[in-house]
């Protein structure tokens, strides 16, 4: 028969209400029950528990899904330092604990809240600071890009000026060579003139 959830307040999520009923139900004690202190609960024989108990309360028989939901609500596995104690000679025994899941204190269930992811849990101020940092970084990148483009333009202009100077130097060198040839021919002419007419100069 379908098990009924505990008569908890409307502020208690359905999963927690069903979990409370499940742990409280004496019929399920062989597979899930309170610890002797009432501050935690034990799950025995997970395979059998998933097959026989979970479908009655949660419409599934997936133990991993059940444990994930426990983790989402802040439940933690209890790890005992001493091994081979009195409680697990034959069955596997997993113990879970939450500060507000305590036997006889059903009203504390309202204090158990589902975890939110890191992004949802970020404070608005932190988000704004992060956005401001990103905006400043983008502005700096744009400024650097503008400076880089200015430098590129100047380098290109210098390159063109340098090419023009080299062309001018080459042109001047060519003119110099031509003038040198003219001067050399003129000197040769004068020398030949002197040699052919010794008395020409007096």
Image (cartoon, rainbow, N blue to C red):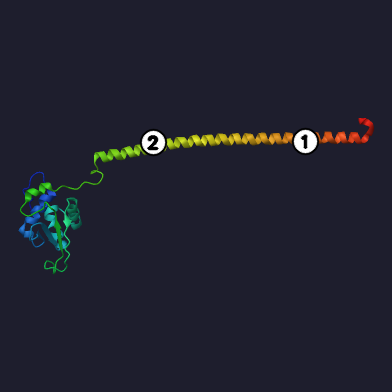
Q: Which residue is mark 2?
A: 139
Question: Callout 1: 10 Å neighbours few (<14), some, many (20+)?
Answer: few
Percent from the top left, x then y, of residue 93? 15, 63
The quadrant in which residue 164 appears is: top right
Q: Residue at x 51, y 37 (%)?
A: 152
Out of 104 and 68, give the one closest to the viewer: 104
Element on which disc 1 rests: helix
CB contact under 8 Å: marks 2 and 1: no
The quadrant in which residue 186 appears is: top right
- Give me the disc on residue 180: 1
Out of 108 and 136, give the one closest to the viewer: 136
The reply to whether residue 2 is in sight is no
Q: Quadrant of the C terminus?
A: top right
Q: First in sequence: mark 2 or mark 1?
A: 2
- Give me the disc on residue 198: none
The reply to whether residue 26 is in sight is yes
Q: Residue furthest front?
A: 202
Q: Is residue 41 above or below residue 122?
A: below
- Depth check, mark 2 against mark 1: the one in front is 1
């Amino acid at each position: 028969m379908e098990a009924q959830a505990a008569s908890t307040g409307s502020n208690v999520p359905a999963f927690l209400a069903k979990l409370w009923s499940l742990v409280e139900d004496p019929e399920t004690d062989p597979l899930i029950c309170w610890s002797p202190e009432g501050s935690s609960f034990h799950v025995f024989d997970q395979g059998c528990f998933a097959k026989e108990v979970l479908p009655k309360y949660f419409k599934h028989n997936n133990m991993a899904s059940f444990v994930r939901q426990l983790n989402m609500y802040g439940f933690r596995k209890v790890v005992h330092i001493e091994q081979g104690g009195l409680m697990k000679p034959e069955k596997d025994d997993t113990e879970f604990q939450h500060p507000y899941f305590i036997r006889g204190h059903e009203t504390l269930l309202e204090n158990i809240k589902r975890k939110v992811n890191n992004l949802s849990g970020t404070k608005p101020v932190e988000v704004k600071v992060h956005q401001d940092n990103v905006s400043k970084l983008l502005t700096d990148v744009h400024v650097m890009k503008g400076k880089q483009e200015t430098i590129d333009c100047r380098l290109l202009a210098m390159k063109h000026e340098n090419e023009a100077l080299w062309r001018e130097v080459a042109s001047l060198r060519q003119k110099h060579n031509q003038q040198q040839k003219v001067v050399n021919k003129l000197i040769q002419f004068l020398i030949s003139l002197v040699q052919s007419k010794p008395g020409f100069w007096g």
